């Protein structure tokens, strides 16, 4: 009895609060009231459904998680359902084990735990879903072989332009050079997808990187926008490739600047620390925690609904002059660094949000 009292005293004095424990759980947890509305979720649930607690709270559980009939019939009983197919995002379905437990108070309230095909598994699936390495090597070789003759064409056009006295001929040779440069730039972007070399990661101050890209945006492509920030000042250092992260952030800021209205466009950069988000490393390498979140938010209309399933795929774009490589390259660079990128439309009125989840320096889960 004395030992039990000592253990209880230690727990009361040392243990974190229930909210911190809930947030750190790797399983997705949803609290549902007697009317079937979601009243609280943890971080793993936010990541699983790729949306925030604010968006999920108040929704009918049946609209978010289609569950077996006996869940709705057994208000005051526990049950477990295995291998249930649940669509966690549009077009993305995972198979989960579902455990339901009633709360003693208030009456009719229940706790739902989703596990098995959870956040980490879904992230890992997307990390391995981007083609095989042999295809990347073939594409890299092809890009190299195309650039060689392009260089010769450009040099010949430049020589003809210098030798010609005819203005119309000079205009045509300039057109050739401009088109060669455009094709070469496109190939350079595509080569970013074929680079399979491991990027050296090191410890970086996230705020220094954010201020760097913000300065570039504010003095260039986003100079007509209002750029705001909402930083968590306590974030630790991140483990990233500095140049790669800068390229990702610039791509997202440029997309946001192109999406918003030039009269009242607002871009917001938000940072936060999120518990419970992690991905598997290579076989036997354990898991990597991704607790540092950077969000690029804009008040533009967002991508068309029919593009949501292909948003991070190469050549998927709704822009008349777009190439559809920016988000695909951002996704690849994030995966190369061990991180993740997600898209969501939420808030009222709706805003476009791209979330980057990054590893903390010196931290594995």
Image (cartoon, rainbow, N blue to C red):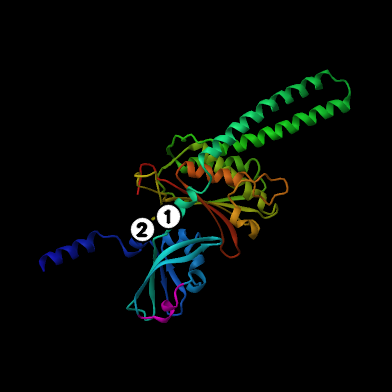
Q: Is residue 72 magenta?
A: yes
Numbered badge on residue 24 = 2
Q: Position of residue 143 (x, y in %)?
A: 62, 33
Q: Earlier in the sequence, mark 1 or mark 2?
A: 2
The outermost residue toward the left is 2
Question: Residue at left 45%, top 78%?
Answer: 69
Left or right of 2 on screen, residue 175: right
For disc 1, the neighbor class at 10 Å (few under 14, some 14 to 19, many from 20) is: some
Give the magenta-colored segment's residue range. 67-76
Q: Position of residue 268 (x, y in %)?
A: 56, 52
Q: Secondary structure at mark 1?
A: helix
Question: Residue at left 56%, top 63%?
Answer: 347
Indicate the quadrant containing the N terminus: top left, top right, bottom left or bottom right.
bottom left
Viewer-side label of 1, 2: 1
For disc 2, the neighbor class at 10 Å (few under 14, some 14 to 19, many from 20) is: some
Question: Residue at left 29%, top 60%?
Answer: 16
Left or right of 356 on screen, residue 301: right
Q: Is residue 166 above or below residue 35?
A: above
Q: Position of residue 362 (x, y in %)?
A: 36, 42
Which image quadrant for residue 175? top right
Which image quadrant for residue 14? bottom left
**Spatial distance from mark 1 to mark 2, Cα to Cα?**
17 Å
Q: Secondary structure at mark 2?
A: helix
- Using the image as rendered, state which of residue 200 and residue 245 is in the foreground: 200
Q: Report the number of numbered marks.
A: 2
Q: Is residue 205 above or below residue 301?
A: above
Circle 1 residue: 121
Question: Residue at left 42%, top 64%?
Answer: 96
Left or right of 194 on screen, residue 236: left
């Amino acid at each position: 009895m004395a030992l039990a009292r000592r253990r209880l005293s230690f727990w009361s004095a040392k243990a974190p609060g229930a909210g911190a424990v809930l947030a750190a759980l790797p399983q997705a947890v949803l609290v549902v009231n007697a009317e079937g509305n979601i009243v609280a979720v943890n971080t793993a649930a936010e990541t699983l459904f790729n949306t925030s607690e604010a968006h999920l709270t108040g929704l009918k559980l049946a609209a978010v998680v289609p569950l077996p009939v006996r869940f709705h019939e057994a208000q005051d009983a526990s049950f477990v359902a295995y291998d249930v197919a649940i669509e966690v995002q549009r077009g993305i379905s995972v198979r989960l084990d579902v455990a339901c437990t009633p709360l003693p108070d208030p009456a009719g309230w229940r706790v739902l735990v989703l596990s098995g095909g959870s956040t980490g598994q879904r992230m890992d699936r997307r990390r391995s879903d981007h083609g095989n390495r042999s295809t990347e090597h073939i594409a890299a070789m092809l890009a190299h072989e195309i650039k060689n003759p392009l260089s010769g064409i450009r040099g010949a056009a430049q020589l003809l332009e210098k030798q010609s006295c005819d203005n119309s001929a000079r205009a045509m040779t300039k057109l050739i050079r401009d088109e060669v440069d455009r094709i070469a730039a496109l190939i350079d972007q595509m080569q970013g997808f074929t680079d399979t070399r491991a990027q050296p990661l090191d410890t970086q101050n996230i705020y220094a990187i954010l201020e760097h890209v913000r300065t570039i945006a504010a003095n260039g492509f986003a100079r007509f926008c209002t750029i705001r920030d909402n930083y968590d000042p306590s974030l630790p250092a991140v483990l990233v490739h500095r140049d790669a992260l800068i390229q990702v952030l610039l791509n997202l800021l440029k997309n946001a600047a192109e999406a918003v209205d030039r009269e009242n466009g607002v871009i917001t950069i938000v940072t936060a620390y999120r518990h419970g988000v992690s991905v598997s490393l290579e076989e036997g390498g354990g898991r990597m925690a991704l607790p540092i979140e950077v969000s690029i938010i804009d008040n533009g209309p967002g991508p068309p609904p029919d593009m949501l399933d292909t948003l991070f795929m190469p050549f998927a774009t709704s822009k008349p002059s777009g190439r559809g490589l920016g988000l695909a390259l951002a996704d690849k660079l994030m995966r190369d660094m061990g991180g993740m990128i997600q898209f969501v439309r939420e808030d009222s009125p709706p805003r476009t949000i791209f979330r980057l989840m990054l590893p903390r320096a010196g931290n594995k889960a």
